[in-house]
Image (cartoon, rainbow, N blue to C red):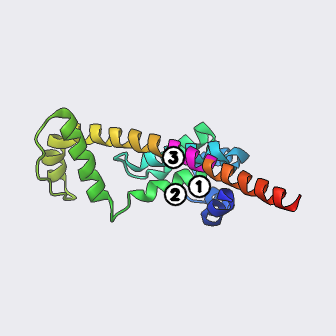
């Protein structure tokens, strides 16, 4: 049941293989393990996708695809999850990561106004890069762990529930 639900929302493997940014992986995308949907591949894909979603870098889909290939987990799920950070959510997520890093390093949080300019990068980013990077790594690792173990637990719960339904159905018919 969980498989069917998830598969409804996954894109066609042929579309992903032909994606212009993912073509650099070439024949590695033909590995059937990247398209299988089971507890291991789904939970691993959640871990990869959530980890890369909170990493402060452009084109997160490419490293997410590379990690999915490396760990043989579901590629579409891993790539789709990086879109948790999108143009609408990137500012609050980045500020949260910066806040977490500043809290861990016990440094004051500066009011940061993001601007796309070299001046901003040379002044503001130099001042906040350590807490921002630390916070991003910490939020990435924690969200990946939570995603991994949550999906494994939900998948297991779903399978046990389906077994129990089948068992009750079998007992009624016997």
Residue 80 badge: 2
Which image quarter is the C terminus in?
bottom right
Q: Which residue is mark 3?
A: 150
Is residue 22 magenta-colored? no
Q: Position of residue 21 (x, y in %)?
A: 53, 55
Q: CA distance from mark 2 to mark 1?
A: 6 Å
Q: Identify the magenta region.
A: 149-156
Q: Quadrant of residue 173?
A: bottom right
- Judged from this view, the residue extending furthest toward the right is 174
**Counting other residues with Cα less than 10 Å from the Cα at mark 1, is it few (<14), some (14-19), or many (20 or more)?**
many
Element carrying mark 1: helix
Task: Report the label total.
Answer: 3
Instruction: Look at the picture and state if 20 lies above or below 102.
Output: below
Q: Position of residue 101 (x, y in %)?
A: 23, 39
- Position of 126 with respect to 21 (left or right) is left
Element carrying mark 3: helix
Element carrying mark 2: helix
**Counting other residues with Cα less than 10 Å from the Cα at mark 2, is it few (<14), some (14-19), or many (20 or more)?**
some
Q: What's the magenta bit mostly, secondary-structure-wise?
A: helix
Residues 154 and 8: in front is 154
Q: Earlier in the sequence, mark 1 or mark 3?
A: 1
Which image quarter is the N terminus in?
bottom right
Residue 162 badge: none
- The residue positioned 82% from the left and 56% from the top of the image is 171
Which of discs 2 and 3 lies nearer the camera? The answer is 3
Q: Position of residue 149 (x, y in %)?
A: 51, 42
Q: Which residue is mark 1?
A: 76
Tell me if I can see residue 125 in this picture.
yes
- The residue positioned 52% from the left and 48% from the top of the image is 46
**Counting other residues with Cα less than 10 Å from the Cα at mark 3, is it few (<14), some (14-19), or many (20 or more)?**
some
Q: Tell me whether circle 2 and circle 3 mark residues in contact (CB < 8 Å).
A: no
């Amino acid at each position: 049941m969980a498989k069917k639900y998830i598969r409804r929302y996954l894109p066609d493997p042929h579309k992903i293989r032909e994606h212009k940014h993912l073509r650099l992986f070439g024949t590695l995308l033909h590995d059937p393990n990247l398209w299988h949907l089971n507890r291991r591949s789904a939970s691993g894909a959640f871990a990869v996708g959530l980890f890369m979603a909170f990493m402060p870098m452009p084109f997160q889909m490419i490293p997410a695809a590379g990690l999915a290939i490396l760990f043989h987990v579901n590629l579409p799920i891993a790539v789709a999850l990086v879109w948790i950070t999108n143009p609408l959510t990137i500012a609050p997520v980045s500020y949260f990561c910066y806040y977490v890093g500043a809290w861990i390093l016990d440094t004051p949080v500066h009011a940061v106004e993001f601007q796309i300019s070299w001046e901003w990068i040379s002044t503001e980013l130099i001042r906040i890069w350590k807490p921002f990077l630390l916070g991003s790594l910490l939020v990435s690792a924690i969200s990946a762990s939570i995603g991994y173990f949550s999906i494994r637990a939900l998948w297991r719960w779903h399978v046990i529930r389906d077994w129990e339904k089948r068992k009750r159905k079998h007992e009624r018919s016997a």
